[in-house]
Structures are given as structure tokens and as C-alpha cells.
Image (tube, helix red, strand yellow):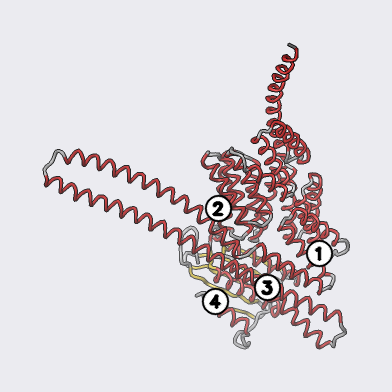
Amino acid sequence: MKYFIRPIFFLLFGIITCFAQESQSLKLNDSAMALYKSDPQKAILILEQALEIAEERQDAYEIAKSKNNLGIVFRDLGSFEKAKELSTFALSTNDSLLKASAYNNIGVVNRNMALYDEALTNYLKALDIYQAKDMKREMATTFNSMGLVYSYNDVNTKAIEYHLKAKAIFEALDNKKGISEVYNNIAIIYANDGDLQQALDYFKYSLEIEEKLNDKKGMAESLNNVGAVYYYLNEADSALTYFRKSLQIEKSIGDEVGVAASYNNLASVLIDLNRIEGTKSYIDSALFFARKSKAATDMEVTLDNYAKYYEAKNDSKTALRYFKELTAFRDSILNIETNEKIAELEIEYQTEKKEKEILSQRADIAEQKLELNEKNTLVLGLIVLAVVLGLLGYLFYNQQRIKNRQLQKENQLKEALLKIETQNRLQDQRLRISRDLHDNIGAQLTFIISSLDNLKYGFQLPEKLSNKLKSISEFTTTTIYELRDTIWAMNKSEISIEDLESRISNFIEKANSASDRIQFKFNTTTSDINNLKLTSVQGMNVYRIIQEAVNNALKYAEPTSIVVDFSQSPDHLKITIKDDGKGFDSSKVDLGNGINNMKKRAHDIDGDFSLSSIEGQGTTIELLLKNSSKNTTNSV
């Protein structure tokens, strides 16, 4: 008898243990994901314990859940291959929400590995599941991730569209972490567009939220971004402080991608400050962690830092080798084919939505048609042949009208799809041209400057030849700046006064460094002038006129102040450049090419140009542009 009792006892004990393990495995998953942002290493240990329990029970769902959560933590730590493998396994589950989480995680991994079309595909699969279940927070997270894909490919309009969708949902849910991530991502776009102060405010706001949440990963990313803005604002010491704080946190949580990025940022600042000693060790460390995590962005920055480092050491041969490696690497991850695939995926997504709307409309039409047929059947038995013929004629007319409406809607859809496709192709073309200008011509001009400098300092050259080489080097440097200005204008369909002010301020800062005794001022005199929009051609010509006027004042006028003033009337935008230099008598002085060039640029944009100068009192240049619209947001 006792031989039978023991198996029953163990069976009952096994059932109790099974339920206890099931509960324990799920609890371990929940507790690990609650703390992985602040202590990822501890979260990994807990999730591995949960996976062990799930595998002992042979529970497919819990095994998939534990592996996917491990994939999320490893992704945050930069172990992308491992993260992708774990979440790919989780796709074998039948649970749709777990599948959506796995698709999202794989999308983030692909994005970090520069597999942008694959990333967008995974995001769209996750979004379909979340939209079907009306899961707002998860939808917002996915929108935010999709915005990053477009941002990395310089499609900023589409990127901001998705970030703002995410922002609206997160604010409605009062989700602080989500709000922080959205502000951080939008700040990156502002920084790339040159609006550094706006970017700095957004990054600091994101950092404040991350510190309140005690999210170490988020804190490290925000510290790194704040440091980057300070670097672009030429506040190098502040940038180094924030980068070192970020590196310390990234090391403490074991984030390989974050460590690589922080080492790269420190190296970039030190090279910029010409503190070459010891800098190579930072670049070597960045290369180690970038290769280990296979993070495409960090690999690109590391190659760029090597090129700049050897250029600073006057080793032009090694610098050129790294420039070539950098160009080849960029071509491998940012190519037209990738952007076309992303655009095609967006069109497919929008088309699918339209097709669903059309199917719904067709169902409504079919239902209406059925009702009409039923009514007509009733009437046919009660009326004479003449009335039947009349009703048949009416039915035919009504059906034809419905078909016409349907055809009209289908034509509208085709036009909308064609417009989207045309816009995407145009954007791709502009991106390709600007990238070719920057990567090929820009790199070649930089190599010319480096080669000329090496000739000057590596050989004892006659003074006349040395001066000629110096003149060529300065001309090439000026060409690079003009090339960057052209690329800046090319990448914008319209230029605001705020954009122009930022560009002019950068130019004036350079002028200030050469003539610190001269005061420069930039004024706008109306409250709504920041709403004013110029075309890219107009914006570039206005910038060149101001640039030429300031340069003329610096060369010939010996002023103590130069003022650039923007003012607006109902009919005109007026730009004034005024100096208090020695002036000249225009009737006695031959006007040079500079003033003739300014007149030609003004004529090209249908503007009125005037110059007045009084000896001993200075020179004033005015440019009048007609307002083509008087709406709240003007377009000149």
C-alpha cells in the first residue's frame, strides 16, 4: 500500500510546485523589467533564473517571454546580435502582444545596426498589433521609434511627424519616460538643423525627467546629448564634463554602445582643442566597443576621429586612408537603395490604410444596393409595366452614380499615392546630391588643404612659392565653407529668418574672432518676423549679400560697429547692413566686383538694392524684397 501512497504524494507535490514555479517565473520577469533601466546586470541575473524555471516546466510562452525580456536588456547594453537572436526566438509564440514586443525590440536592434528598411518593417508589424488592441502607450513608443529611422536618414519632416504623434499620446497618458524620449529625439533634429539653443533646452528637460525616474541608461544618453550641444556651442570644458559623467554611468551599467559613444565624444573634443597627447587611447577604446556591439553610428564616428587625429599629427597618408575607409563605410549604410526601401514601406503602410477604407466603403455601397433591390422587388409586384420601366431606369442611373463616386475616390487615392511617391523621390534625389557634395568634394578639398600644409611645413620652400601655397589653401578653405552653405540651403525647401539668423551669427562669430575690436549686432524689429519664410534660393542670396557687405566693411571701412537689421512692412521685407567706418564718395570711387555681385544677387531674387556712403560717417546698404503673401506665416 505504501508504494502507491508515495507516487500520489509526489504527484500532488509536483502540481503544487508547478503552479508555484509558474507564478515565480512570471513574477521574476515582472520584477526584472521594473529595474532593468537602473540596474541592468541585476535584471539579467533575475531573467536567467526565470528562464531556467520556465525551461524546467517546458512552458513555451514563459520561455519566449523570458528570452524576449533578456533581448530587451541586452539591446540596451549594446549587445545587438545577442538581443536580436533572443527576440527572434520569441516570435515563435502564439501570443500577439509578446510578438509585438519582439518585433519592436528587433526593430530597435536593426536601427542601431543601420538596417533601416528591416527596422521599419518590424516596427510596422508591431504597430498593427498595438492598433488592433488600441494600446496607446505601445503605439506611441512605436511611433517614436519610427521617427528615429526617418531622422537617421535625414527625412526630418517625416521624423517630426511621427515624434509629435508619440508626444501627444504620452502627454495624454502622463507617461514621463515616453515624454523624455520624445523630447530627446526632437532635440536631435533641432541640433542637426543648427538650432542649438532649442536643442539644449530639450535635452536638459529630458535629463531632468530621467534623473527623477533614476533611469541610468536615460541619464547617460541625456548627459551625452547635453555635452554634444555644448561642444557645438564651442564650450569645450562643459562638453568634456558631461561626456565624462556619461562615460562613468555607461561603464557602471555595462552599456557597450554608450561606452563607445562617450569615448568617441571625448576624443572629438580633445582633437578639436588640439590636445593630441593620449587621445588615441580614447579612439582605440571606442573602436573596441563599437566592433563588439556592431553599432554602425559609433563605427562611423571612430573612423572619422582616426582621420582627424592623424591629420592633426600631420600624417596625411594615414589620414587619407581613414578618410577613404570612412567614405566607403558611409556608402555601405546610407545609400539611395535603403532610402527607397524606407519610402516604399511608408507608401505600403499608407496604401494599406487607404485600401481598408475603400473596402469599408465598398461594403457600405453593397449594403445600400441590397436594400434598394429589396425595395424594388416589393414595388415590382404592385405597379404596372410603365412604372416598372421607370424604376428600372432610375435604378440604372443610381447604380451608375455610385460607380462614378467609387471611381472618383479611387482616382483621388491614386493621385495621393503618386504625390507621395514623387515627394519621396525628390527628397531622395536631394539627399543623394548633398551627400555626394559633402562626402566626395568636401573630403577631396580637405585632403588638398592637408597636403598643402604638409608641403609648407615639410620642405624649405621659397617665400614666393610658400605664399602662393598659402593663398591656395585659404581659397580651398573658403570653398569648403561656401560648399557647406550651399548644402545647407539645398536641404531646405524654405528658409526662415530664424535659420538665416543662426547662419549669419555663425559667420559673424568667425569675423569677431578676426576683429575683436568691432561690435556686431543682428536686429529684428517686428514681433512676427520669425514667421517669415524665404525660398532656399532667396535665403542663400540674402546670406551672400550680407556676407559680402560685412567683408567689404572689414577690408576697407575700418569700422567700430557693424549692424545687420531685418524689418518688415505690409509690402516689403527690408534688410539693412550699416557700418560707422570711414565711408567714401561713390562718385569718385570705382565700384568693385563685390558690390556688382551684390547688385546681381538682388536682381536675381527680384529685390531692390541701394548703397549710400558719406565720408567719415560710414556706409549703408539696403535690400528690399516684396512680400508675396500677407498671411500670418509669410512666404517671400
* Residue under label 1: 271
The residue tagged 2 is 161
Instruction: From the image, tell me which residue sits under label 4.
Output: 602
Q: Is residue 583 visible?
A: yes
Amino acid type shown at disc 1: Ile
Viewer-nearest of discs 3 and 2: 3
Question: CA separation, marks 2 and 4?
Answer: 35 Å
Pick the front one: 368 or 305: 368
Query: Alpha carbon of mark 4 to alpha carbon of mark 1: how far?
Result: 41 Å
Residue 131 x/y as whole percent? 52, 42
Reading the chain from its start, which is encountered first: label 4 or label 3? 3
In this rendering, the label closer to the viewer, 4 or 3: 3
Q: Residues within 10 Å of mark 4 (few under 14, many from 20)?
A: many
Query: Mark 4, mark 1: which one is toward the viewer?
Result: 1
**Residue type pointed to by label 2:** Glu
**Which numbered mark, 2 or 4, is in the foreground of this view?**
2
Callout 1: 10 Å neighbours few (<14), some, many (20+)?
many
Work out which residue is located at the far top of the displayed protein and give it. 1
Rendered image: mark on residue 440? 3
Residues at marks 3 and 1, CA–CA distance in whole angstroms: 23 Å
Res 237 visible: no
Report x, y in % for residue 528: 54, 58
